[in-house]
């Protein structure tokens, strides 16, 4: 667990500045309305608020709702609790009342037998399937981009790892019979825009991706129905792919033979076509739709600015993930990357999920330490010391640094 | 805007945010896991547009679709960057911003959260 001193450095509140109130997890859990957090970039001041079915989370925006998971929660366990899972809606027309008995999933387009499937039929007619997978927003960590870019200014908490249960999309596609001419599958949900002129949120996957073994229509998350704000009653789960494709409140699947020309595919959520997904600031480059997660790793038990034991061996714990090849190794450094040693990997609980790792370092009184971790995936991709940049602030995966100081 | 004024505004907005957040904690969810209807009540906007020339333009146009926190959570943007955002809202999202109001809106946004 994070030391209380570190937590105080991480969470600050109006109460704290006025009355010197010491903050604790209990205060957060009780939904103390005076809680605020200062994310470490300009205009990073945020309130914490408990939205329906949620514990107090960092409010990025209130309408449409965008909520960030306070980072210390990632140290509590490999599965991110449903009530702590980040929330990101694009358009404010989100249904606030959902009757699951009236839910209907339409499967249409280039299929032999178009179908409308109820939630009960989805559960009864198809074999259940479970997968543990990381859902990460494309713009997770955008606030750390330099130069800064406009968009949702997340710190590192626009991600979460959950055990998803549902039915395989390819079973559903097999049931309706996909035409030989089909090339793509387009998904949309029950949410909509406020203005009719605003493009409805829709996302497309190539058929070979959509028809893969691991893509789920999930109706449970960590053994419970999804919170409404995470897409109740059904959301698409595309393991290894950025969350933009994980369409919430999914109620429409359209099999098509043409590329998707809607705004959310052709303009939004695109990254430079170069393998690094990067570009120099101020340049214009060809782009492609964002796709698979980049390998990342984080220290979870020590917040930046923490004070650690003055002399001894300090334990470090963290998480790593990639797009599903699995984590091959995590290296740890306590001297800002000058020297590295291998961290110990925790049990492999699924190649799409968080992988725990641990390490330790020796301290001397008053000394400062730049803690870093660097993961390498089974497919050979790794994290770099210098951040890459792109115009939309997507796919950050630089080696992060947590500066700590040993008590003097 | 002078720094002092700005700080006062920021502090006032933080208090306002905290007050709204208290409403958030009373927002509720009903329904359960057994197939009953799930209904939630979302709290009101956590932040509104601050005073300044052009406030009413922002209030009338921007808040149709989103709360003011969309503006204040951005890094400080230049006039050109704010203009690009306004143009995107018009052309992509269909915001009904009158062409004659665009310059004033850009100036307002720079005044609220801008840089040179």
Image (cartoon, coloured by chain):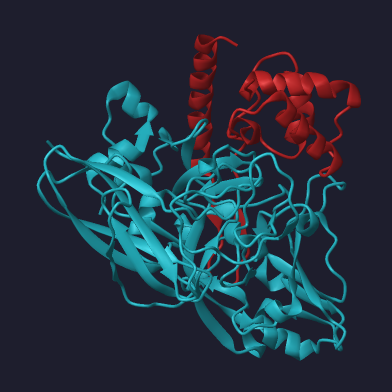
Give the colour chain A carries in the figure: cyan
Tell me the quadrant of the picture where the C terminus of chain A can be found: top left
Q: Residue placed farthest to the right in the image?
A: B99
Q: Tell me if B105 is positioned left or right of A49 in this view.
A: right
Tell me the quadrant of the picture where the N terminus of chain A can be found: bottom left
Residue at screen point 49% across, 64% down:
A295
Give the percent coordinates (x, y) of residue A369: 25, 45
Give the colour chain B carries in the figure: red
Q: Is residue B34 visible?
A: no
Give the percent coordinates (x, y) of residue A400: 40, 50
| Residue B50, picture quadrant | top right
Give the percent coordinates (x, y) of residue A280: 63, 45
Residue at screen point 39% across, 27% down:
A14
A378 or A285: nearer the viewer? A285
Residue at screen point 33% across, 46% down:
A402
Q: Is residue A311 visible?
A: yes
């Amino acid at each position: 667990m994070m030391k209380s001193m570190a937590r105080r450095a991480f969470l600050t509140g109006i109460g704290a500045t006025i009355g010197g109130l010491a903050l604790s997890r209990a205060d957060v859990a009780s939904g103390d309305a005076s809680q605020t957090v200062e994310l470490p970039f300009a205009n990073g001041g945020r309130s914490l608020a408990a939205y329906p079915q949620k514990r107090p989370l960092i409010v990025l925006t209130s309408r449409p709702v965008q909520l960030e998971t306070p980072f210390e929660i990632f140290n509590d366990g490999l599965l991110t609790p449903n009530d702590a899972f980040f929330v990101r809606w694009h358009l404010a027309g989100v249904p606030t009342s959902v009757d699951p008995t009236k839910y209907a999933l339409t499967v249409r387009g280039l299929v032999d037998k178009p179908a409308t499937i109820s939630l009960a039929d989805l559960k009864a007619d198809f074999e259940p399937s479970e997968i543990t997978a990381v859902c990460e927003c494309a713009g997770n960590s955008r606030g750390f981009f330099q130069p800064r870019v406009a968009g949702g200014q997340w710190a590192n908490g626009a991600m979460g790892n959950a055990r998803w249960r549902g039915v395989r999309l390819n079973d559903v596609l097999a049931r309706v019979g996909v035409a030989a001419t089909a090339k793509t599958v387009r998904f949309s949900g029950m949410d909509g825009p406020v203005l009719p002129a605003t493009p409805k949120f829709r996302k497309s996957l190539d058929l070979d991706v959509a028809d893969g073994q691991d893509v789920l229509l999930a109706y449970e998350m960590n053994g419970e129905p999804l919170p409404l704000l995470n897409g109740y009653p059904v959301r698409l789960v595309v393991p290894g792919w950025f969350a933009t494709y994980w369409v919430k409140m999914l109620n429409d699947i359209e099999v098509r033979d043409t590329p998707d020309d809607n705004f959310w595919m052709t303009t939004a959520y695109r990254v430079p076509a170069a393998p690094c997904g990067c570009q120099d600031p101020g340049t214009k480059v060809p782009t492609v739709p964002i796709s698979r997660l980049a390998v990342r790793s984080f220290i979870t038990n020590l917040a930046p600015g923490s004070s650690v034991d003055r002399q001894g061996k300090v334990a470090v714990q963290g998480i790593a993930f990639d797009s599903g090849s699995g984590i091959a190794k995590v290296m740890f450094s306590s001297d800002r990357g000058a020297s590295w040693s291998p961290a110990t990997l925790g049990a492999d609980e699924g190649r799409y999920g968080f992988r725990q790792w641990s390490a330790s370092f020796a301290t001397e009184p008053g000394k400062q330490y730049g803690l870093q971790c660097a993961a390498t995936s089974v497919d050979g991709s790794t994290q770099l010391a210098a951040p890459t940049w792109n115009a939309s602030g997507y796919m950050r995966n630089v080696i992060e640094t947590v500066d700590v100081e040993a008590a003097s | 805007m002078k720094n002092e004024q700005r700080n006062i505004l920021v502090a006032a907005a933080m208090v306002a945010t905290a007050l709204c957040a208290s409403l958030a904690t009373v927002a509720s969810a009903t329904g359960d896991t057994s197939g009953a209807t799930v209904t939630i009540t979302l709290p009101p906007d956590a932040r509104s547009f601050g005073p300044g020339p052009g406030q009413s333009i922002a209030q009338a146009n921007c808040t149709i679709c989103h709360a003011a926190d969309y503006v204040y959570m951005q890094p400080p943007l230049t006039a050109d960057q704010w203009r690009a955002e306004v143009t995107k809202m018009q052309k992509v999202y269909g915001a009904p911003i009158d062409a004659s109001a665009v310059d004033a809106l850009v100036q307002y946004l720079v005044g609220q959260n801008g840089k040179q």
